[in-house]
Amino acid sequence: MEATALGGISVVDFSETFAGAVATQLLADFGADVVVVEPPRGSRLRRQPAWPAWGRGKRSAVLDLHDPAQRGAAQGLAGGADVVIETWRPGVAERLGLSYDALAAVNPRLVHASITAFGRDGPLAGIPGYEALVMAKAGGLDSWGGMTPRPGPAFVSTPFCSWGASQVLLHGVLAALFERETSGCGQRVETSLLHALGVYDCWNWLLRLLAARYPDAFRSAAPVSREGIPNSPLIFRLLVGMSADGRWMQFSQTTDRLWQAFLRAVGQEELLQWPGIIEEWEPARRSEFWDRLLVAVQTRTHAEWSDVFDRDADVWAEVFRHGTELMHHPQITHDGQTLRLHDPVAGDVHQPGPMVRMTATPARPVRGAPPLGRDTDAVLADRTPPLPAPPAGGPVSHRSGTPLAGVTVLELATFFAAPYGATLLCDLGARVIKIEQLDGDPVRNLVPFPEVTGIKVLQGKESIAVDVTTDDGRSIVHDLARRADAVLQSFRAGVAERFGFDAASLLAVNPDLVYLNAPGYGTGGPCGRRPAFAPTIGAGSGLAMRNLGPSVPEEPGLDLAAIRVQSMRISGAAMGYANADGCSALGVATALLLGLVARRRGAPGQEMLTTMLSTLAHTLSEDMVEYDGRSPAPAPDPELYGIHARYRLYETGDGWVFLAAPRDDEWARLHHALGPWGDLPDAPGSVSDAVLATRLGAVFRCRAAAEWEDELTSAGVGCVAVAPSPVEDRLMTEGGIGPATGLVTEVEHPVIGRHTRIVSPVRFSRSTTVAAPACLVGQQTDAVLKELGYGDDRIAALRAGGIIG
């Protein structure tokens, strides 16, 4: 039997949240023994439609943590584990005797990982850890306001914070396990929903910074004017249009070559000759330009567009999928990225397969979710006795440097989704050497100011500019691969093979390599050669339509005015502050770390695969399960206020609040606090949800949002004022919640000078992290070549020959 990446690792999971469940699902998929500790009533997650997928491969132990004897059993179980994961509010683990300090005192090898809402301390630490409360406080709900036709903020149903936290938690756990193989010591790992949200912004913050610094040369403008006309050329290149048969389609022609191919396909090559740049056109000209593109898309049915795509691989659009349609995407089907497992309650369950494919240490999910408490006796009988306490009588506290010190990653990837995964490893101490074309990764120059759109994705890296179409250039890549620990590539299918950078070629050079393919779609199959950008994956995965709920018409015959309005709503749903690029980058970092941990634990070098499309199946896993009798996943109302009366937006006397009080104990506190203000039922189920929302709405209009936040949070109710957008301002500027929670620092960039950047979203009790600036194109070319043994004369000759830059 093949080894698994995490075989022999024991994990105790106390979480009852999406983030904890998704994180431990991956650990279980790759061989860890995951024990879910559940209360007598069962985990709240069991009542979710996706539980059969989230619980697969795990064991269930029922322990009542309010009972002293059973709490002691839980302490013993956790004290003998390799990893403990909890998502309680700050202070709960300490009260239960399940904190890092308590457990590490008897097991110094323990990796103890936690997720909170806003961090373990500070003025926001006591706010309940609901996704929408974090989004509201960070300006996220206001920034997505364009998704709804009514005024005000919009509820966002994609769990961006929770998905991010699940992956950041995995980054911390895997990095700590990697470091433990050398030090022998565990440590505490922490992240928060807020810190995970900071990962997503690709470049908006830096564009705003640029406009603020150079107001005479640049101005910050909304992507869409008040009249509903696009201001940004990216909206045209990322066109959302409707086919003749009523299917919404997402085109993504970011580079000049792809844009020119698209205009040829729609018979609009003459638009390339229009003078000036789009940002400087009068609104009437931009409006005409947009209309011509939308009308051109509407001249063909989706099937006719598919014929165009088959003839030209540079022209591509995804349809906007709904619900579980992603599970039947032709690329997902081709790559076998779903599986069927038997669940004792749900029966045969069709669900996303493991997020990462590994050739030497593959995942082996062989059983469905466990019945409640099935493994309690076996788990308690088989638990490993805790290790003796260290001589100092407490957890190891000395600092240990970065957890990935000494790791070298060779990056052969462009734009954002895959490269930012490697950037996250830079923050953990890995050395990432990026191979760039001589004029640089195109991500550097997406706006008419050099470097600014590439800064975030290039932070902490070294750049070597090489013409890899030449023999000498390819030889340099092979020389680097011989010395690397991991290679990351994200080319379209066939490109790596053409250059000799595919897994077979580089593993022949270095058999110990962790080689990760991280394309948009795949390394072959029906879509492997298609261009993949955040909007296409957001459309094809169902992310955009999940955010929009049932509010978008999708039928033939819509007039141009309606198409324009709905196009902007759909575009905003797929490409808000958070999008498929950030979701996928988080998965890339997880995959790289999983491969590195497997190798550190004795696995050979191997080829691995994760894709943007398959990663989104896990991001949206609340939707991505199919079985008989499955209840629907919670969906927002058509106007995007929220899920139900106790988890939704309310307009107040001044501003908006988001209320999160779905549990009975939370309703009791809310009812007590609001009693003097209105006629609310003792039992919320005694009236319809619509009636309850109306009554709550009348109460909330009596006072300002800030007043409600103060009163209700002090009463232990999840209710916060909706902060104004943009999110990047809330996270990055002085006085915002980012600086207040230690989320940002300052670095010096060689072009734009000193600027604020997000720090690593994961924190360790012993290991340190890094926050470095971005590099310029080829900035380290000479230094890296000299490390490889290239002399000055040879470097000069390579530069003279146009091989290096």
Image (tube, rainbow, N blue to C red):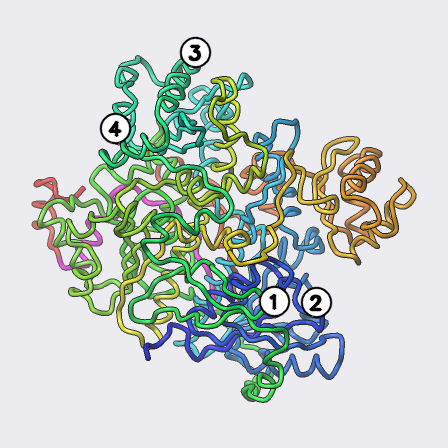
- The mark nearer the N terminus, 2 or 4, is 2
The amino acid type of the residue labelled 4 equals Ala
Query: Which of the two discs, 4 and 3, sits closer to the camera?
Result: 4
Measured in 3D between alpha carbons, the distance from the residue under mark 4 to the one under mark 1, in whole angstroms, is 50 Å
**Percent x, y for residue 687?**
83, 45
Residue span colored magenta? 766-789
Residue 182 position within the rendered picture, expressed as x and y whole percent measured from the top left: 39, 76
Q: Which residue is drawn at 84% across and 54% down?
A: 668
Circles 4 and 1 in contact, beta carbons < 8 Å:
no
Q: Earlier in the sequence, mark 2 or mark 1?
A: 1
Q: Distance between the residues labelled 1 and 3?
A: 55 Å
Image position, residue 553 (x, y; %): 54, 29
* Amino acid tagged 1: Glu
Q: Does the magenta stretch include residue 545?
A: no
Q: Residues within 10 Å of mark 3 (few under 14, many from 20)?
A: few
- Marks 2 and 1 in Cβ contact (< 8 Å): yes
Whether residue 499 is situated above or below residue 298 in the rendered picture: below
Q: Out of 136 and 370, give the one closest to the viewer.
A: 370
Residue located beneath label 2 in the image: 92
**Quarter assignment of residue 233:** top left
Q: Name the residue under label 1.
A: 86
